[in-house]
Image (spheres, grey):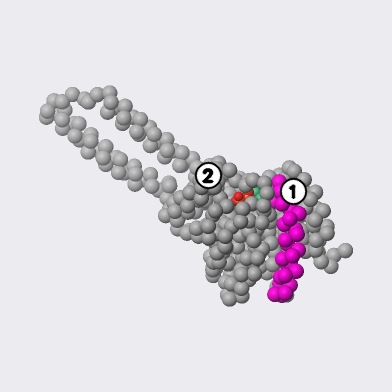
Amino acid sequence: MKEIAIIVPVYNEELSIPVFFNEFVKFSNKLQNVHYKANVLFVNDGSTDRTAEVLTEFINQTPNSSALFLSRNFGKEAALFAGLEHAQSDLIIPMDVDLQDPFELIFEMIKAYEQGADVVLAQRSNRASDTFLKRLSAQWFYKLNNKMSALKLQENVGDFRLMTKQVVDEIVQLQENQLFMKGLMSWVGFKTTQITYTRPARLNGKTKFNYLKLWNLAVEGITSFSTLPLKVWTYFGTFVAFVSFLYGLKIIIEKLFFGIAASGYASLMVAILFFGGVQLIGIGVLGEYLGRTYLETKRRPRYIIKNQIQNKENNV
Ligand code: UDP
Ligand code: MG
């Protein structure tokens, strides 16, 4: 019988965990009818509420469940990576604990897998459960990213996807510390198909991703897979230098042949401020890449595991 591992990063989710377990047990029973076995692996990402206690209690009473406890909050990307590194099953599916990723969909994913897919993406057919601003910013991000980067990201596809063990084995080989999981998971390639679903609203509590975090994730995504923001300055600089040269020529000709005095304060100010601003933006972009290079060179671990618990079916 093939096994499926569900990977669930959790951060301060004491309220969602009991409901999730309830759904997991139901799902697990149904899955046996189609001859698969379900495991669940939680990654407690340094929660500060009662998540750890609630998790331990439920894992003790639920077969085929286990959890990694990270030493602090490392962020969802690192927590997910930890889960992928520790998953042992034939098929692996990252999921949110807030039931925004419906269990029911996994049956469809399995069908697609049985038809030969290595990766089955779950695309949100609408984002009604997100705010207007989040939808708009997500749309811009995908557009911008797909224009700039050789790696094309599927629009409105989250981390919720089925992957074979072979795919996951390749993902966890990737060396970077600054993780943009969605990018890494598609970078490895393999035969990919897609199913669509309507994403329900969060079970309870609020999203852990505010706009600042989303912005940082977006910058991470673009800088991880594209150097276009760096290269563009070469062309922009060349263009500006060329225009400046023509303008300089004009001033010299005017002065020599027509005796027109230097133009005034306004044009000087505009030129100084414009070039000052442009240079600062250029330095800022450089800084984004340099900062990431700096962090990568430290080779710090992506996460630290404090302890680990598991409940195996035949374990006593
Ligand atoms: N999460 C995590 N570490 C963090 C933030 C979030 O492990 O630092 C988990 C969270 O508990 C949830 C999943 O990542 O299971 C997705 O988070 P959330 O539902 O807030 O994101 P959204 O669905 O709004 O994108
Ligand atoms: Mg969610």
Start-end of magenta stretch = 9-38
The quadrant of the picture occupied by the C terminus is bottom right
> For the residue marked with disc 1, what is the amino acid?
Glu
- Residue depth check, mark 2 versus mark 1: number of the one nearer the observer: 1
> For the residue marked with disc 2, what is the amino acid?
Trp
207 relative position to 304: left or right: left
Depth check: 79 or 154 in front? Answer: 154
Q: Which residue is at a point 75% across and 43% down the rendered structure image? A: 49
Q: Main secondary structure of the magenta part?
A: helix
- At which x and y percent is residue 177? 60, 50
- Residue 266 falls in image quadrant: top left
Residue 215 - label: 2
- At which x and y percent is residue 270? 31, 30
153 relative position to 254: left or right: right
Residue 14 - label: 1
Q: Which residue is at a point 61% across and 73% down the rendered structure image? A: 111
- Is residue 25 within the magenta segment? yes
Q: Is mark 2 on a helix, strand or loop?
A: helix
Total numbered labels? 2
| Label 1: few (<14), some (14–19) or many (≥20) C-alpha neighbours in 10 Å | some
Q: Is residue 273 visible?
A: yes
Q: Farthest residue in the right direction?
A: 316
